[in-house]
Image (cartoon, rainbow, N blue to C red):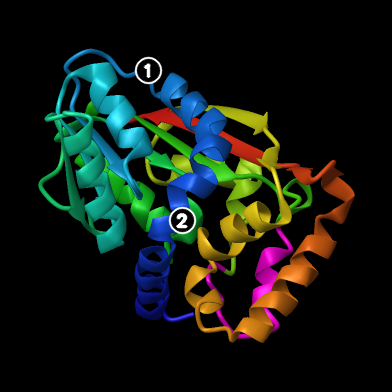
Amino acid sequence: MEPALQRRIQRYGWDKAAAWYEASWQRQLLPAQQKLLDLAGLRPGEKVIDIACGTGLVTLTAARTTGGMVTGVDISDKMIGLARIAASKMQIDNARFERADAEELPGPGEVYDAALCALGLMYFPDPGQALAECYRVLKKGGRIAVAVWGRRAHCGWSGIFDIVDRRVRSEVCPLFFRLGHTEILKNSLLSAGFTNINMEVLNSPLEYASDEEACIASFAGGPVALSYHKFSQDVKEEAHAEYLASIREFRQGDGYLVPGEFVIASGVKE
């Protein structure tokens, strides 16, 4: 897919998903986000950038942890707007947010002590360029920590992409699960210049209390939101039924416990 088109799909897709994102994903992604922050080893007073920050879940935690200035960047205006509202409500004044492309980060090089990217790298047209930009803006000795979804076979919800693509050609993220192979992610970090790579695989299931909750998270609150909002009501209901059938084996009572795998990695700019 043409990179400019992929960026537009991501920008407006996440604008559509913003209203449902935290309710759908905050609890589900917390284990991976906590592991990422652990690997980042943030220290008091450090300057941090959080790429693909969404509504600021990781950014604001980092701001509270370090007390230093933390910058969150995201391609979605609506995600950035929600992050600013959250910072204001929580009275966190050492976090700032701006809309930016991960492959062209704002500002000069060698500014930050740490760079974070929690579950955003899979969506970028050129993940290698985004990692190179992280390398550029980090100081010598600075650290990077990234988290991506794991292998397709270990993510029980992965059928969502095929279900949507059969109804509208979306190609939201054609190589979404590629970085979930640990060697590919490790080699991507090495190619960007990082050393001392540390890799961890985390298995953490996604819990949904009902059919409705599972469908809202996967369709309205996630990466296929832009395509989903183009569906007629009949097509939405048909897609819901197909998706629920795809996760039926993970049913637990009225809800679901769907397998989820994350790969978290860290590295250093020497």
Left or right: 149 in relation to 238: left
SS class, disc 1: loop
Q: Position of residue 102 (x, y in %)?
A: 31, 55
**Magenta span includes 161:** yes
Q: Position of residue 21 (x, y in %)?
A: 45, 52
Task: Give the quadrant of residue 174.
Answer: bottom right
**Magenta span includes 136:** no
Residue at coordinates 57% horizontally, 83% vertically from top-left? 231
Task: Give the quadrant of residue 193.
Answer: top left
Name the mark nearer the viewer: 1 or 2.
2
Q: Is residue 141 visible?
A: no
Q: Tell me the amino acid under the disc marked 1.
A: Gly
**Can you identify the residue that label 1 sits on?**
41
SS class, disc 2: helix
Q: In this picture, which residue range is highlighted in magenta? A: 158-173
**Can you identify the residue that label 2 sits on?**
20
Q: Position of residue 229 (x, y in %)?
A: 50, 77
Left or right: 186 in relation to 73: right
